[in-house]
């Protein structure tokens, strides 16, 4: 097992570059996947609440298991069966809270309640069995993924490349080398909303080329984080430049992300 | 009675059957020459009645998928809805939040296209025969209070519509006298069966609970056990028109309105019977 890219952990425990106004109007809250920023989440996945005055300050979780209260803020999910479930928290901030949708939450329409001192805010949450999302380096659901490229030599030695780099103001794709061609290369994506997939094979395409998915499921280090291992990457990707990467879980596409190949 | 009105109209107009069969995709004008006047001796139901009855159900299905995917009604999508009988608005329902690009969303688009095509097809076929199609009756898409609030709610209602649709065509088939109409009905039944197979698999994949519409309903997983809605003989359930109306009228026997059709349906087949039972 390789350790999760630290950028993913930064995303989970930090407020995103996005603002609450992208999702919620004043005095309301909205919920999205923390990975795809889409409106549908899965049980045992990581979601974000967006709003204003959700917390008095930014407080990240600093240990595992995750707490259910941070900075005096709690989040609960009342699912479609009326069960009120307390959520674990990665981070609270005035405009955003990152939390884990309780694993036992029933599928369907739910209500999220944020309690911060005397203030209580509520908003809708859509829960589906799978809602695949891939974490991106810019924490906006787009662009280059917060991923790793695992290179394995014929002798079994491993090297890890990071497929993104700092651009002028954001992270941009860092061209991936698939040389020497005698080595094997695997793309390791981190996401959420994937683990409850059926036994049907996950699918992926890179630049329109179908690539094998060797694993799609739970990443064991952090709650709600899933992992997708893609590869070995075909040499047909060499020279393709920037391409789209799409992962399908039970026929549901994750947010499209981009990589660049030398 | 509506059915008699239609029959008189047919006799007076002397329909162009060749054109009608062209509409049905058939080359021979001789097939099914007794279409318009063919009458089922037992039930006193004509083939025209059955086509008009089917058109009511196709209006309902088309409205459901169109509203769920677009937030628009079928007339706003260019589908004609005027005709004989009582016209009415469609109420309830809303655009459903899907994960776009998913097989479910893409399937819903395809199925919606198919259902709108069925409405157009049946209307054109009737018109070609010189018979005015029925108008779209008033439809309440919110009759069950579900179907639009999530992907899973959509699957639940869509699956119910499609399985009922399959059983409706299967139940009507023995009543159809004209073999050309029967052939077309078989093709529409097959289409509805493909739809329900798709939706039943999505119900299982999405772990979407479903409701049983009556005691012969075969629910897919997770609420039921069968991916395919067939009995021990490998046959789909069938429902008579009255048993179908029982369902779409909101579980009412001997009724002429209710549920999805608050003002009733148009055409000669318009009253529900008791619910279908396993022994029926």
Image (cartoon, rainbow, N blue to C red):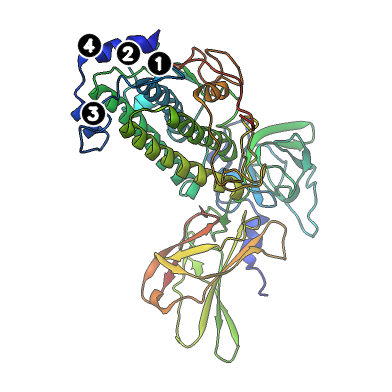
Instruction: Please state the total of marks drawn on the protein image.
Output: 4
Number of the label disc, if any, that sits on residue B6: 2
On the same chain: label 1 and label 2? Answer: yes
Which is closer to the viewer, label 3 or label 4?
4
Please name the residue that numbered disc 1 is placed on.
B267
Which is closer to the viewer, label 1 or label 4?
4
- Whether the residues at callouts 1 and 2 have beta carbons within 8 Å, the answer is yes
Mark-to-mark CA distance, 3 and 4: 16 Å
Q: Is mark 4 on a helix, strand or loop?
A: helix
Kindly give the residue lying farthest to the top in the view shown: B1
Of the image marks 1 and 4, the number of the one nearer the N terminus: 4
Taking the spot 61% from the left edge, 30% from the top edge, the residue there is B213
Chain ID for label 2? Answer: B
Q: How crowded is mark 3: few (under 14 residues within 10 Å), some or many (20 or more)?
A: some
Chain ID for label 1? Answer: B
- Drawn side of residue B268 relative to residue A98, left or right: left
On the same chain: label 2 and label 3? Answer: yes
Of the image marks 2 and 3, the number of the one nearer the N terminus: 2
Q: What element carries label 1?
A: loop
């Amino acid at each position: 097992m390789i350790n999760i890219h630290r950028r993913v952990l930064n995303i989970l425990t930090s407020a995103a570059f996005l603002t609450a106004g992208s999702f919620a109007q004043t005095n309301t809250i909205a919920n999205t996947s923390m990975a795809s920023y889409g409106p549908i989440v899965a049980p045992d996945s990581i979601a974000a609440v967006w709003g204003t005055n959700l917390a008095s300050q930014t407080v990240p979780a600093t240990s595992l298991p995750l707490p259910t209260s941070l900075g005096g803020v709690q989040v609960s999910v009342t699912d479609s069966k009326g069960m009120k479930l307390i959520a674990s928290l990665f981070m609270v901030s005035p405009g955003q809270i990152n939390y884990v949708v309780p694993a036992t939450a029933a599928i369907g329409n739910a209500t999220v309640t944020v309690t911060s001192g005397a203030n209580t805010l509520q908003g809708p949450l859509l829960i589906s069995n799978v809602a695949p999302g891939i974490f991106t380096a810019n924490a906006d659901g787009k662009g280059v993924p917060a991923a790793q490229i695992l290179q394995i030599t014929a002798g079994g030695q491993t090297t890890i490349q990071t497929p993104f780099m700092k651009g002028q103001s954001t992270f941009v794709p860092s061209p991936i080398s698939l040389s020497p061609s005698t080595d094997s290369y695997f793309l390791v994506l981190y996401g959420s909303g994937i683990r409850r997939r059926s036994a049907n094979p996950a699918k992926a395409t890179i630049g329109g080329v179908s690539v094998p998915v060797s694993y799609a499921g739970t990443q064991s280090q952090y709650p709600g984080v899933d992992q997708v291992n893609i590869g070995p990457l075909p040499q047909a990707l060499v020279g393709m430049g920037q391409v789209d990467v799409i992962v399908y879980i039970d026929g549901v596409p994750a947010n499209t992300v981009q990589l660049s190949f030398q | 009675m509506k059915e008699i009105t239609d029959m008189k109209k047919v006799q007076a107009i002397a329909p162009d059957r060749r054109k009608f069969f062209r509409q049905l995709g058939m080359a021979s004008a001789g097939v099914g020459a007794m279409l318009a006047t063919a009458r089922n001796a037992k039930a006193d139901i004509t083939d025209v009645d059955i086509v008009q009855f089917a058109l009511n159900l196709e209006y309902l299905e088309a409205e459901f998928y169109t509203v769920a995917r677009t937030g628009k009604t079928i007339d706003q999508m260019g589908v004609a809805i005027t005709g004989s009988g009582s016209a009415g608005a469609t109420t309830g329902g809303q655009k459903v939040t899907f994960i776009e690009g998913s097989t479910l969303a893409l399937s819903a688009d395809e199925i919606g296209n198919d259902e709108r095509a069925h409405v157009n097809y049946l209307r054109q076929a009737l018109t070609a025969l010189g018979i005015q199609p029925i108008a779209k009756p008033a439809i309440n898409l919110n009759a069950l209070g579900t179907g639009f609030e999530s992907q899973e709610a959509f699957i639940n209602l869509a699956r119910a519509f499609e399985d009922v649709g399959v059983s409706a065509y299967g139940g009507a088939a023995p009543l159809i006298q004209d073999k050309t109409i029967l052939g077309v009905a078989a093709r529409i039944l097959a289409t509805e069966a493909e739809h329900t197979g798709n939706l039943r698999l999505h119900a299982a994949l999405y772990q979407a609970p479903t409701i049983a519409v009556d005691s012969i309903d075969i629910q897919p997983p997770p609420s039921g056990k069968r991916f395919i809605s067939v009995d021990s003989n490998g046959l789909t359930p069938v429902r008579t028109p009255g048993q179908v109306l029982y369902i779409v009228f909101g579980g009412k026997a001997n009724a002429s309105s209710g549920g999805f059709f608050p003002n009733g349906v148009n055409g000669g087949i318009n009253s529900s019977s008791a619910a279908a039972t396993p022994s029926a």
